Amino acid sequence: MTTPSTAAVVTGCSSGIGRAVALRLAAAGYPVYATARRVDTLADLADAGLPTLPLDVDDEASMVAAVDRVVADHGAVGVLVNNAGFALQGTVEETSLDDVRRQFETNVFGLVRLTQLVLPGMRDQGFGRVVNIGSMGGRFTFPGGGFYHASKHALEAVSDALRLEVEAFGVRVSLVQPGPVRSAFADTAVRSIGEGDGPYAQFRRDLARRYSAAYERGATTWAISPDEVAKVVVEAVHSRRPRPRYAVGVVARSLLAARRVAPDRVWDGLVRAQWPTPGGRQSRRRSSAA
């Protein structure tokens, strides 16, 4: 019987979680193809001996070419780590639909299409691992992040359906739910908030400060490192019976537990106490101080 391919494709490897996952999987003995939209951002991984490929999850031809390369080298993609994505921040009223579509194209539709491309090979060889990098935000929502959270909510549903659909073919699906991660995530999120006047102007300023402060404090306390997430990904890939979900970090575990038991009105009160809301107590305190 032919040994199934364990060749791994990891998306979004230019920094952060994707880069850490690629290095961890390679160290564990998996043939790893590190990918990103711009292959020049992967130079350090290439220097470390990892094959690198251009792969843009918003581009069908790019995804097909990357999968074809791995199939030509190994017969099939055995492991897929769907990590590429970004966080759009903004109020529901003010965010343009073009930006919302772009969020879902990257975080959901591109992920789904790439998964569709690798599944035939996994089914044929009777083995596969799909690990989707979600977020604790797939289970609850903060004001200002509705569309990012919606994309992660969608990933929860897709992962649950896929897990049951492909199990009989030897393919296992896991969803990783990190809390705050020390990476470029916060910078990207803050940049997407934008500036300007209008009814949400103070909320946008408060939201930008909240993200920056949380990640600055988290650098030494609550935020986790990309490598901590990578360790969990390797566990999911390597396990004979991987768990459906892996919450990573004390923040993720505690908030997910709280959301499971808190009624909506209680949860809303907790969010208002800890997170900016338009006209909320944090904005009022700041206005009074000014």
Image (cartoon, grey):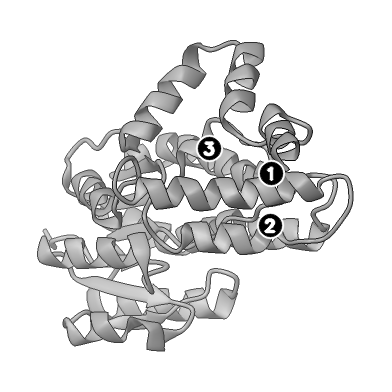
Q: Which mark is residue 144?
A: 1
Residue under the image location 60 percent in, 10 percent down: 263
Please identify the quadrant where the C terminus is shown. Answer: top right
Disc 2 to disc 1: CB gap under 8 Å: yes
Front tag of 1 and 3:
1
At numbered mark 3, what does the secondary structure look like: helix, strand or loop? helix
Query: Picture coordinates of residue 183 (x, y %)?
Result: 39, 60
Q: Which residue is mark 2?
A: 193
Under mark 3, the amino acid is: Gly
Under mark 2, the amino acid is: Ile
Q: Which mark is residue 138?
A: 3
Q: Nearer the viewer, residue 68 or 56?
A: 56
Q: Earlier in the sequence, mark 2 or mark 3?
A: 3
Residue 66 is drawn in which quadrant? Answer: bottom left
Query: Picture coordinates of residue 284 (x, y %)?
Result: 74, 32
Q: Earlier in the sequence, mark 2 or mark 1?
A: 1
Q: Nearer the viewer, residue 227 or 236?
A: 227
Query: Picture coordinates of residue 6 (x, y %)?
Result: 20, 62
